[in-house]
Image (cartoon, rainbow, N blue to C red):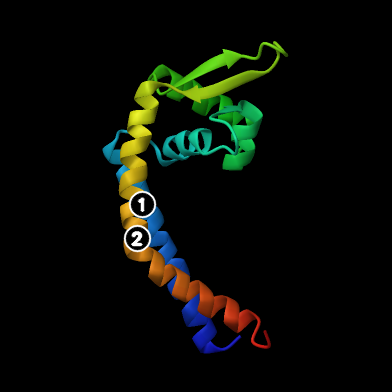
């Protein structure tokens, strides 16, 4: 790799980290840990339904099932999510957002979308430069 390619990769990583730091602060302003915001987002944004199993949530967040259970417990204590047993399989428990959870997520998703509108074009340009450098013949 050339010095310029390292600089581009570093710039992309820096801008991405700035966005993640923004996200952490935005979650904290709603009195949430970043992982709690991500859990709410994954539940609402799960493909083709708005509820998930603990295992699905763990997979989407790339954490262990045990960690996901603790996360769900904390969110449930704050009335942001609710558990519901499956009518087909009593061993299966679904997690969904409560009305309060939906309101909190809506606030956070709105500020994230606004921030992404600002930083997104730069991230796209940098990502394009990173991938072009990785595949110069294409």
Q: Whole-percent x and y of residue 77?
A: 41, 17
Q: Whole-percent x and y of residue 100?
A: 35, 23
Q: Are marks 1 and 2 in contact (CB under 8 Å)?
A: yes
Give the quarter of the image for residue 123. Answer: bottom left
Q: Does 105 appear above or below 130? A: above
Q: Whole-percent x and y of residue 67?
A: 57, 31
Q: Does 135 appear above or below 101? A: below
Give the quarter of the image for residue 130. Answer: bottom right
Residue at 39 percent of width and 37 percent of height: 33
> Judging from the image, what secondary structure is the residue with disc 2 in?
helix
Indicate left or right for 100 with 91 as reference.
Answer: left
Quadrant for the C terminus, please: bottom right
Residue at label 1?
113
Indicate left or right for 128 with 118 as reference.
Answer: right
Question: Which residue is situated farthest in the front direction here?
Answer: 48
Indicate left or right for 59 with 128 as reference.
Answer: right
Residue 32 seen anywhere in this rendered image of the structure: no
Tell me the number on the disc at residue 73: none
Q: Whole-percent x and y of residue 136?
A: 64, 87
Residue at 43 percent of width and 62 percent of height: 16
Tell me the number on the disc at residue 117: 2
Question: Which residue is situated farthest in the left direction here?
Answer: 29
Residue 8 seen anywhere in this rendered image of the structure: yes
Quadrant for the N terminus, please: bottom right
Front residue (pair 35, 123)? 123
> Judging from the image, what secondary structure is the residue with disc 1 in?
helix
Per the model, the C-alpha gap separating discs 1 and 2 is 6 Å
């Amino acid at each position: 790799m050339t010095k310029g390619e390292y600089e581009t990769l570093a710039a992309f990583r820096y801008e991405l980290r700035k966005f993640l730091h923004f996200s952490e602060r935005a979650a904290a302003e709603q009195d949430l840990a970043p992982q709690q915001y991500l859990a709410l987002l994954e539940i609402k944004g799960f493909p083709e339904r708005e509820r998930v199993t603990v295992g699905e949530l763990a997979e989407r967040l790339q954490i262990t099932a045990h960690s996901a259970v603790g996360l769900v417990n904390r969110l449930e204590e704050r009335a942001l999510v609710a558990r519901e047993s499956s009518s087909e399989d009593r061993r299966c428990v679904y997690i969904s957002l409560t009305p309060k959870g939906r309101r909190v997520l809506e606030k956070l998703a709105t500020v994230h979308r606004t921030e992404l509108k600002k930083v997104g074009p730069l991230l796209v340009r940098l990502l394009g430069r990173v991938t072009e450098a990785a595949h110069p013949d294409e």
